[in-house]
Image (cartoon, rainbow, N blue to C red):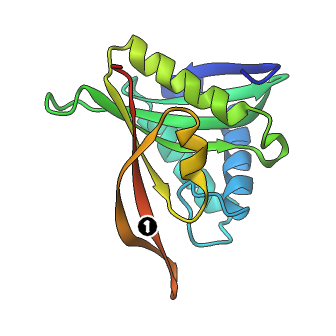
Amino acid sequence: MASGVSLRWLTSPDELSQPLLDELVGCWLRVSNAGGAVGFPFLPVDERAVRTAAVELRASLDGATRVLVATVDGALVGWSLLRSNASPLTRHWASVSRVQTDLAVRGSGVGGALMREVARAAADEGLEQLHLEVRGGQGLEDFYARLGWEVVGRWPAALRLRPGDDRDEVLMVLRLDR
């Protein structure tokens, strides 16, 4: 794990305090406007849009949907979202999304620490797989592949960022039952 990083799961709305929500909004805003594929493809995004999404995210925390936050010296430096499935058909896997690290800590291992903890927690819950969708053309597949994820498919030109800039949506899986 990256030196000095603390990881904590938030599983209910009251665990995402207003100060922590403000930090999450700041991180999400900076990562988005730097071109990060974290839910706001049409840039620049403003703080109001990010705050609205963050408040909705906080309201969705119910144990099956949870946020993993990474902090250094008490300050938020990254986070990710894990969503389990209620259906008996898909209960054996969960989805990972919004994986991001603040620009100031890029390359320090925070992203890897987040993803290793997500995998550990999912395996401890008895899940067999994690699913992830990434925006093609960002180099994200290599990052996840180093952590054991594999590309299992893609939706060609599924994402239109602007006319003439279509990207594949890349489907990835981490098999936890191996």
Name the spot of residue 92 as percent of width and height, x first: 25, 25
Seen at 84% across and 44% down, the residue is: 104
Compared with 143, 116 (above or below) is: above
Compared with 178, 115 (above or below) is: below
Seen at 56% across and 37% down, the residue is: 80
Seen at 14% across and 32% down, the residue is: 89
Task: Return the residue nearer the eye: 157 or 148.
Answer: 148
- Residue 4: quarter of image: top right
Q: Secondary structure at mark 1?
A: strand
Tell me which amino acid carries mark 1. Answer: Asp
Taking 41 as reference, is 78 left or right?
Answer: right
Name the spot of residue 152 as percent of width and height, x first: 34, 48
Residue 11 in view (yes/no): no
In the displayed orientation, state which residue is furthest to the top.
124
Name the spot of residue 5 as percent of width and height, x first: 76, 22
Taking 133 as reference, is 126 left or right?
Answer: left
Task: Return the residue nearer the eye: 126 or 63.
Answer: 126
- Residue 113: quarter of image: top right
- Residue 17: quarter of image: top right
Compared with 29, 92 (above or below) is: above
Task: Return the residue nearer the eye: 14 or 170.
Answer: 170
Name the quarter where the C terminus is drawn.
top left
Residue 13 in view (yes/no): yes
Task: Return the residue nearer the eye: 62 or 108.
Answer: 108
Mark 1: give few (<14), some (14-19) or many (20+) Cα within 10 Å: some
Residue that carries the numbered disc 1 in the rendered image: 168
Name the quarter where the N terminus is drawn.
top right
Seen at 44% across and 31% down, the residue is: 61
Compared with 101, 67 (above or below) is: above
